[in-house]
Amino acid sequence: MPKIAGNGQSITITPFQLKLIKSRLPYKYQVVCDLMFYTGARVSECLAIRRVDVLCGAVVIRKENTKGKQETREIPIPEHLIAAIDKLPNENSYLFAGMGGNGHLSRYAFDKILRKTCKRLELDGFSTHGFRRTFITSLARNNHHSKVIMKCSGHKQLSSLEKYIDVTEEEKVAAVASLW
């Protein structure tokens, strides 16, 4: 069930839809979208990333910033995202500085601008958590082993991970047809 009025799960998006969303956002918010799309980080994890957490072609999600606060994750990121991060203004130790350079951008501020953008694009049912669902679903569709996906997403239980993976009607038909 897609997300409606804050209830249900967010839909997943395509790279084209990501591009559309980003085309309507200020640069800093575009980079937040890319970071969540390419790392599967939760919005709060993403916004808490510091400049020193981007190193050697990867981003580090510190365990104190994760949902369970149990394990640090290191996720490789593409070169174009590293270049985008390098272009961000250096206002404080966070990648995404808050108002007046204090702390980091708030979840509320990012959520508000994303919701407005999605509404203008008539992209119903997408939320900040949709980036995470898209990341996990994409890895699953690319046939990556569930243990690899769990290592990237930080999930400890396979049952929790599986809730994130979307299955389309076409995928269901193709799976059954593969037996014919």
Image (spheres, helix red, strand yellow):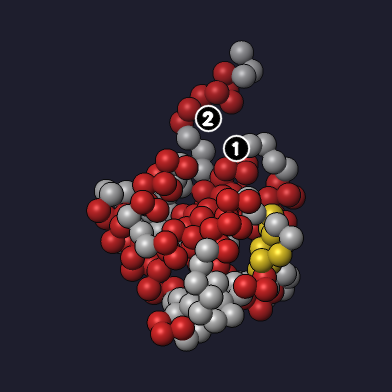
Q: Residue at x 52, y 63 (%)?
A: 87
Q: Is residue 13 left or right of residue 41?
A: left
Q: Is residue 66 left or right of residue 92?
A: right
- Residue contact between numbered discs 1 and 2, judged by CB atoms under 8 Å: yes
Q: Is residue 39 above or below residue 91?
A: above
In percent of width and height, residue 29 lies at 43, 63
Marks 1 and 2 sit apart, C-alpha to C-alpha, by 9 Å
Describe the element under mark 1 as helix, strand or loop.
helix
Q: Residue at x 45, y 76 (%)?
A: 105
Q: Nearer the viewer, residue 46 or 11?
A: 46
Q: Is residue 4 visible?
A: no
In percent of width and height, residue 114 lies at 36, 61
Q: Is residue 95 above or below residue 152?
A: below
Q: Nearer the viewer, residue 26 or 134?
A: 26
Q: Nearer the viewer, residue 133 or 49?
A: 49
Residue 171 marker: 2
**In which quadrant will I find the C terminus?**
top right
